[in-house]
Image (cartoon, helix red, strand yellow):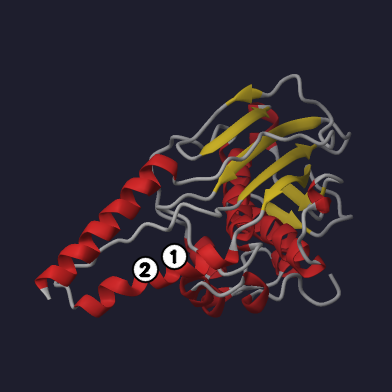
C-alpha cells in the first residue's frame, strides 16, 4: 500500500508540475468591431486574465438603471464547431452573470425600456475543450478518494485540451455614447478550472467569469482586477443557488441553481444542466 501511495503521489506531483509549466491554453484579445470606440482602452490585466478597458467613472457611478442586450457571436467566433444550443448557453451565461452582478447596485430593466446604460457583449474567440481529456481529468481527480488518505489531496487538471474565451463588451448611455468598455480574454487553467466533458465546457464557465468582471467594472467604475477578495452579496448567493433574482429582469436569462452547480462539479456537460434563457426570451 505504501508503494502504491508513493507511486500515485509521484504521479500527482508530476501532473502538478505539468500544470504549473503548461497549465493553461492561450486566449487572444480578439476584437470584432462591435464596440463604438477602441482608442481609449488601456491594459488592465489580472492574474489569469488579459484585458483592455475604459470607464467614464463619473457618468457610470451616476447611472442608476441598466438594460442588457443579448450577447452575440462575432462572425469569426460563430465558425467554431459548437452546436446552436452550446452557443446559446454560452451567450446566455454571459448575460445571466452580468445581470446578477449588476444587481448589486443597479436596477436592471428589460431591453427596450429606458435605461441610463445599455450593455452589449460579443464573443470574439472560442477555443474548444477536449472532452476526452476533461473526462480523464475527472478520473485522475477521484484517485485519492480510493487511497483512504487522511488529508485531501488536490489534483490539478490535466493540462491538455483546455479551452478559452475572448469577449468584448461596452455600456452606452441613452445617446449611444460609450461610457465603459472591456476587451477580455482568459483561458482555462489546470488549477482553478473545472473539467466538463463537453467541447463548450471551458467557454461556458469562462462566460460567467467575464460577466462577473464586466459587472464589477460598472458597479465600482474601476478595474475589477487585482482587488482584494470580497464576500459575495446576499443577492448574488441567492441568485447563484437558483433563488429569485433581485431584479425580475434577470429571470429572462433563466436559473441554474444547485443542480447546475452539482453537475458542473461532476463534470457534466453544461448543455445537460442549463436550459438557457427562460421560455419566450
Identify whether 24 is placed above or below 39: below
Answer with the quarter of the image where residue 153 lies.
Answer: bottom left
Q: Residue at x 34, y 54 (%)?
A: 15
Residue 141: x %, y % from top left: 36, 68
Q: Looking at the figure, which quarter contains the N terminus?
A: bottom left
x, y percent for residue 29: 67, 34
Residue sitting nearer the eye, 39 or 271: 271
Q: Which residue is mark 2?
A: 141
Is 219 rendered above or below residue 52?
below
- Residue 137 in the figure: left or right of residue 120: left
Q: x and y percent of residue 39 in the render?
A: 76, 19
Is residue 154 in view from this perspective? Answer: yes
Looking at this view, is 232 or 84 the one in front? 84
Residue 155 is drawn in which quadrant?
bottom left
Q: Give the number of the disc on residue 137.
A: 1
Please give the name of the residue rendered at 46% of the width and 68% of the height, measured from the top-left corner. 136
Label 1 near label 2: C-beta < 8 Å? yes
Tag 1 secondary structure: helix
Horizontal side of 121 relative to 186 (left or right) equals right
**Is residue 103 in view?**
no
Please, which residue is most extreme toward the top here?
39
Q: Quadrant of the C terminus?
A: bottom right
Amino acid at each position: 500500500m505504501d508503494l502504491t501511495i508513493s507511486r500515485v503521489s509521484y504521479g500527482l506531483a508530476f501532473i502538478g508540475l505539468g500544470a504549473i509549466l503548461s497549465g493553461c491554453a492561450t486566449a487572444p484579445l480578439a476584437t470584432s468591431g462591435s464596440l463604438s470606440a477602441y482608442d481609449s482602452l488601456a491594459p488592465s490585466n489580472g492574474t489569469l486574465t488579459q484585458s483592455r478597458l475604459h470607464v467614464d467613472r463619473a457618468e457610470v457611478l451616476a447611472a442608476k438603471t441598466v438594460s442588457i442586450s443579448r450577447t452575440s457571436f462575432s462572425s469569426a467566433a460563430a465558425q467554431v464547431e459548437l452546436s446552436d444550443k452550446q452557443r446559446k448557453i454560452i451567450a446566455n451565461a454571459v448575460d445571466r452573470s452580468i445581470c446578477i452582478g449588476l444587481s448589486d447596485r443597479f436596477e436592471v430593466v428589460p431591453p427596450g425600456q429606458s435605461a441610463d446604460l445599455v450593455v452589449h457583449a460579443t464573443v470574439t474567440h472560442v477555443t474548444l475543450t477536449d472532452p476526452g481529456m476533461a473526462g480523464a481529468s475527472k478520473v485522475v481527480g477521484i484517485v485519492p478518494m480510493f487511497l483512504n488518505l487522511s488529508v485531501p489531496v488536490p489534483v490539478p487538471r490535466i493540462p491538455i485540451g483546455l479551452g478559452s474565451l475572448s469577449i468584448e463588451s461596452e455600456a452606452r448611455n441613452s445617446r449611444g455614447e460609450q461610457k465603459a468598455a472591456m476587451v477580455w480574454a482568459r483561458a482555462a487553467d489546470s488549477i482553478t478550472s473545472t473539467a466538463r466533458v463537453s467541447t463548450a465546457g471551458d467557454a461556458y464557465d469562462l462566460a460567467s467569469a467575464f460577466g462577473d468582471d464586466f459587472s464589477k467594472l460598472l458597479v465600482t467604475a474601476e478595474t475589477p482586477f487585482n482587488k482584494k477578495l470580497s464576500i459575495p452579496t446576499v443577492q448574488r448567493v441567492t441568485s447563484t443557488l437558483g433563488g429569485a433574482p433581485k431584479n425580475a429582469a434577470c429571470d429572462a436569462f433563466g436559473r441554474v441553481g444547485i443542480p447546475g452547480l452539482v453537475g458542473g462539479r461532476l463534470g457534466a456537460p453544461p448543455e445537460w444542466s442549463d436550459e438557457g434563457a427562460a421560455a419566450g426570451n
